[in-house]
Amino acid sequence: MLAIIHAELVLPDRLVPDATVLCDNGVIVDYGKDVAVPKDAEILDAEGLYVGPGLIDIHCHSAGNISYFDDPVTSCRSALEHGATTVFPTLYFNLTGEEMIRDIDVVLKANEKGLIPNFGGFYTEGPYMNENHGADRHTAPWAGEVLREKYLPVLEKAGEWARVWALAPEKGADALFPFMEDARRCSPKVCFAVGHSEAEAWQVDEFIENGLTIATHHTDAVGYLSKYPECRTSGVVEAVQRNDEVYAELICDEHGVHVDPYVIRLTRKIKGKDKLILITDAACFAGACIREDRKKYRDLSFDFNGELAGSKLTMADACRNFLIHSGASVVETFLAASTNPAKATHLTDRGIIRKGKKADLVVCDDMFRLSAVVLNGKVVK
């Protein structure tokens, strides 16, 4: 049994000072003030720091500048050391079907051997997104017609481990609704996201009615179709802001390049504390930045054309930047970094401090500088 004592406990709606959390057999068995600590318990003294649920990164291509698909063990370990007790290795739409199947297999074999305990499933940016948007978009093996014989082997290989499929609604309901039905058959709890899209709002709404619930890196890699010169029409961003049921992913880098800090604050105001999801979108593209105004930004990643291609963030970094840019509380930040992503992707066993939930926890200060990470009730950092 593990007892975390002297904790500033972070619950979804409040803080509990000088609290205790008891963990046994990988789950939380008790928490709060005046909790009796068994004599034989292992003690972790939080020394007044915050203790919140482990961070959940649902959208990440790499960690520690290592791709999850090149070395899942090292990358998962790096993410864990920075507080991500659950990660969704993310496939990208520049891969062929054969390459996606290969990469899925690499991760699943490592998972079968018990080598990546914080693996939570796959997020897939694509395959059917808009090839006019995003990093490395000039490599687009899925451009053109949506073909069942092409995508089905990928869906079946990922199986129930597929958590999120991102797609561009402008490719059409007739083409993509059958894809969504096949995805649900292979993974009944799968979620769908609008990503790398220039759809009009009505097209996004149509997909929301069919179960789309997430906005892939909200405001990034999206466009809109203007019917008249110098007149803005409604597109992906507006549809996501208007529909209360949609979760908005945010990449919060230090200088607000991916999402301008004003837009972060606006999105927080519109979507509310329960519909924001912090992600890293960490990627290990080896391209160089060709824009002088961005060369100083060490937490950004660039493709081989010098264009923005994800980040080099950790989840702890993302939380810190969100605090700074938005003015959110520590409680709200844990919602966006753990509770909300768990809810959005149907991970009902984690993301909150409650009896019977997974004992995945982090100990940190008010700027998310980590002092300890707990996975399945064991201290791993």
Image (cartoon, grey):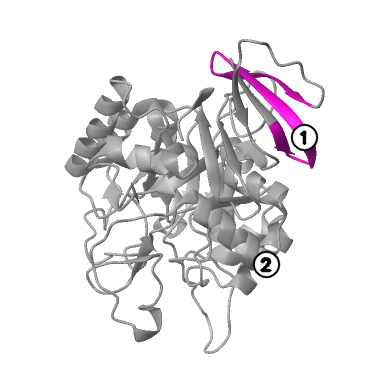
At label 1, the amino acid type is Asp
The residue positioned 79% from the left and 41% from the top of the image is: 14
Mark earlier in primary sequence (1, 2): 1
Residue at image mark 1: 18
Could you tell me which residue is drawn at 37 percent across and 67 percent down?
Answer: 133
For the point 17% across and 40% down, the residue is 98
Q: CA distance from mark 1 to mark 2?
A: 31 Å
Mark 2 highlights which residue?
265
Residue 99 appears left or right of 76: left
Above or below, 48 against 269 in this view is above
Residue 4 inside the magenta-drawn segment: no
Q: Residues within 10 Å of mark 1 (few under 14, many from 20)?
A: some
Residue at left offset 49%, top offset 74%: 225
Query: Is residue 376 left or right of 4 when viewed as pictured?
Result: left
Residue 312 visible within the image: yes
Q: Nearer the viewer, residue 223 or 68?
A: 68
Residue 74 image offset from top left, x and y in percent? 29, 39
Q: Nearer the viewer, mark 1 or mark 2?
A: 1
Label 2: how many Cα within 10 Å (few below 14, some 14–19, many 20+): some
Disc 2 marks a residue whose amino acid type is: Arg
Q: How many marks?
A: 2
Percent position (x, y) of residue 166?
A: 43, 49
Q: Is residue 252 above or below residue 362?
A: below
Which residues lie in the magenta part? Answer: 6-32
Question: Which picture quadrant has residue 5?
Answer: top right
Question: In the rendered view of the protein, which quadrant contains the N terminus?
Answer: top right
Give how far across and how far down residue 60 sits, in percent.
Answer: 40, 48
**Badge 1 element:** strand
Where is residue 290? Give x, y as percent: 28, 80
- Residue 28 on the magenta segment: yes
